[in-house]
Amino acid sequence: ADGMRANFIKTIVQNDISSGKHTAIKTRFPPEPNGFLHLGHAKSICLNFGLAKEFGGTTNLRFDDTNPEKEDERYVQSIMTDVHWLAGDQHLDPLQGKEPWDGLFYASDYFEQMYACAEELVQAGKAFVCELTPEQMGEYRGTLTTPGRSSPSRDRPPSESLELLRRMRAGEIPEATMTLRAKIDMTSSNMCMRDPALYRVRHIPHQRTGDAWCIYPMYDFAHCLSDALEGITHSLCTLEFAEHRALYDWILDHTSVGARCHPRQIEFSRLNIQYTVLSKRKLITLVESGVVDGWDDPRMPTISGMRRRGYTPSALRLFAERVGVSKTESNIDMSVLEDSVRADLEDVAPRAFAVLEPIKLVITNWPEGEVEWFEVLVHPKRPEMGVRRVPFSGEVYIDSSDFMQEPPNKKYFRLAPDRPVRLKFAYVVHCDDVVTDACGQIVELLCTYNPETRAGNTPDGMKKVKGIIQWVSCAHGVPITVRKYDRLFSTPWPGKERPDGDFLKDLNPDSLEVAQGFAEPSLFDTASAQHNDTPKLPYQFERVGYFFEDASSTLENVVFNRVVTLRDTWAQ
Ligand code: ATP
Ligand code: MG
Ligand code: MG
């Protein structure tokens, strides 16, 4: 492994190891199972798993499942699948059944221990049961510029709070009438420290603990205790939690769990990417409103969507590496993501010919009925990837963008009347005539081929033929449906410029374009996901882009997703 690029968190870890503070580090990735993972999570996964790998430490996957309302077992499954896939050594060779995480935990496994800490705090006079309603609590909290006011329950004796807490747990207390709150400082300039709630009453079953609990810990309470119970050394989170760090430390400073282990919380900036949204809430809206075809729609910035589209785990890891880790806002251009997948696929993607906007080219001097098979490399720089056999015949499709009846200037190197072009690996052809229909639409191009130009031969007089284009034999080409994906949104920061913030109004209406084309038959010797179960790499359709067979593809209806174009079409 090349190791992670230098960043401030890596430096902290290095120092903690060289100073002897820690002999081994332990990190965790703590998703809430309330949605599918997105690219922001990928950054966090790469950071947590990457640090552990680099320093010989370990990483836990922990489901932060303390809010049963929004959580679902289906999300748990998808998260495991995604983390597993992202950590895979390469697209073709996932971890062979081994899990990438060292421990798999659920915060709900610690409910009993967390509750014990709550009782400890109450007994020590550090927490109390408060009877303000949520609205009142809001009022009492004060603002950034005005101090808060103490709850009337704040000074009730610990024994009374303890009894109420036990009644809360026993199910005797209705929702929104009582909370357990820490007793810290209602005048603190840090709002998180103004007697924050630690437990609330929710009479709803939990996906794992069932009816065992009707009080649930707040995120701030559950998170630090879970970290400590697992012996986490470095608890990495995004910058919004910087203010919460004081509370993280306070809870650990006042509980026995925290006395045994006190992880260090370190914040880094969250990932934002232009022309998409990275927030589960917004992604859920996209799924539920039906504007995308589910969580794994290839336009979604979810790990499952990227996977379906044809992104490789190594491309996403490269992206995370390029994005880096810092404390400054990271607003990343979509091109960084697209360049990462191009860089990753260039050396590994098998090549193939496909024509996505076909026009027919008829070779008038080709021997009737003859078929010639060209053996060409699967990858031009990697002979070990083998050869493919490409059939050539008297009728081939070329892409309509490779022909112009009246080319604009001398720099036009594609096919035009009197401007010959090389059909890659095969022959140079000369366009003699253009057959059009009644509307002036091109029906076919009548061409002659030069037998002496076979397979790259350049006899005298042919040296000036610069254009080389791809083609597919009409008789052999396999019809394919191609989904050309573009950015999901038409503005860099969806909803941001709108008074109502409605990001759905910034959807790109042209984010999906469907085309019908033809691909060389060699694809289907080995390619179709339907043929066998091993995951495949995307193809580079020469001169077009990278394409990956969609999960829905069948032999009768072959569907390819465009992963990315060959070049950045947005840059000028
Ligand atoms: P969202 O805001 O999309 O709901 P979240 O932070 O609530 O995300 P969690 O499941 O709680 O989602 O996050 C799990 C981990 O992933 C956390 O450690 C969180 O900091 C990290 N994470 C989430 N979004 C990003 C992001 N955009 N950039 C970097 N890390 C992120
Ligand atoms: Mg969250
Ligand atoms: Mg969130």
Image: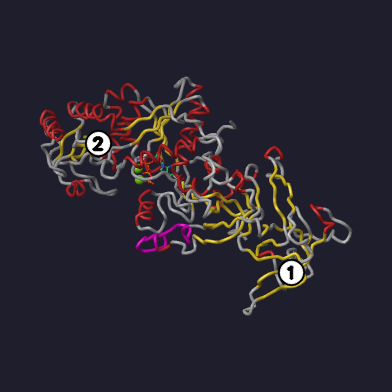
The residue carrying mark 2 is 217
- Is residue 259 located in the magenta-colored stretch of the structure? no
Q: Is residue 491 magenta?
A: yes
Judging from the image, the colouring scheme is: secondary structure
| Percent x, y of residue 182 | 22, 35
Q: Amino acid at mark 1?
A: Leu
Q: Is the N terminus in the top left, top right, bottom left or bottom right quadrant? A: top right
Callout 1 crowding tier (Cα within 10 Å): few <14, some 14–19, many ≥20: many
Q: How many marks?
A: 2
Specify start and end residues of the magenta stretch as a single range. 488-504
Pick the front one: 478 or 188:
478
Spot occupied by residue 491 in the image (x, y as percentages of width and height): 47, 61
Q: Residues within 10 Å of mark 2 (few under 14, many from 20)?
A: many
Compared with 98, 443 (above or below) is: below
What amino acid does circle 2 point to?
Pro
Choose mark 1 or mark 2, whichever is in front.
Answer: 1
From the viewer's perspective, is 513 left or right of 178?
right
The residue nearer to you, when weighing 220 against 437, is: 437
Of the two numbered discs 1 and 2 on the same chain, state the one appearing first in sequence: 2
Residue 436 shows which numbered tag? none
Q: Nearer the viewer, residue 550 or 146?
A: 550
Query: Which residue is depicted at the point 15% across and 39% down?
Result: 130
Marks 1 and 2, how far apart at CA:
75 Å
- SS at mark 2? strand
Q: In terms of secondary structure, where does tag 1 sit?
A: strand
